[in-house]
Amino acid sequence: MKVYINLSGEGLGHASRMVALAKYLQKNGYDIVFASYGKAIDFIKSHGFNKVYEVKREAEICGDDKGNFNWKKTLWRSKTLPINFLIAMKQHKRIIERENVD
């Protein structure tokens, strides 16, 4: 069985959890296909997964100089979110069809 895992590439919190899950599934006979963007791509590959697709980032999460979340900057930089979301969904659909995910 093939499992498709799509995750945020902003930080590595989601990626580290999904890599742990993917390793467990892989040990139990599952074939894993990843999709992500940003820092997560290299992180996933560094753990030995070779089916890793890069997809469009839907939104950009931004912070201020002190590391705090910045709503205004995030909204401004994510103004193309609806278009980016549609592009990303089309990419996911193609990957799922190409990889024949269960």
Image: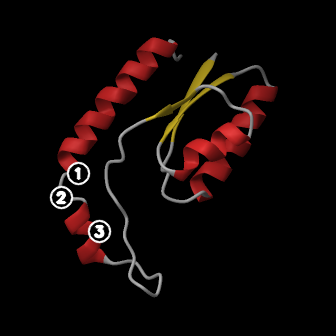
Residues packed near mark 2 inside 10 Å, few (<14), some (14 to 19) or many (20 plus): few
Q: What amino acid is labelled 3 in the image? A: Thr
- Which residue appears at 67% of the width and 51% of the height? 16
Mark 3, secondary structure of its residue: helix
The numbered mark at residue 54 is none
Q: Earlier in the sequence, mark 3 or mark 1?
A: 3
Mark 1 sits on what residue? 81
Q: What amino acid is labelled 2 in the image? A: Lys
C-alpha distance separating marks 3 and 1: 11 Å
Asked whether the beta carbons under mark 2 and mark 1 sit within 8 Å of each other, the answer is yes
Colour scheme in the image?
Answer: secondary structure
C-alpha distance separating marks 2 and 1: 5 Å
The quarter of the displayed image where residue 18 is located: top right
Q: Position of residue 27 (x, y in %)?
A: 81, 28
Q: Would residue 33 appear left or right of 22 to someone viewing this image?
A: left
Mark 3 sits on what residue? 74
Identify whether 94 is placed above or below 19. Answer: above
Q: Would residue 97 appear left or right of 76 to someone viewing this image?
A: right
Mark 1, secondary structure of its residue: helix
Asked whether the beta carbons under mark 3 and mark 1 sit within 8 Å of each other, the answer is no
Identify whether 80 is placed above or below 36. Answer: below
Q: What amino acid is labelled 1 in the image? A: Leu
Identify whether 23 is placed above or below 75. Answer: above
- Which residue appears at 65% of the width and 47% of the height? 43
Residues packed near mark 1 inside 10 Å, few (<14), some (14 to 19) or many (20 plus): some
For this rendering, which residue is in front, 3 or 91? Answer: 91
Mark 2 sits on what residue? 79
Identify whether 13 is placed above or below 62. Answer: above
Mark 2, secondary structure of its residue: loop
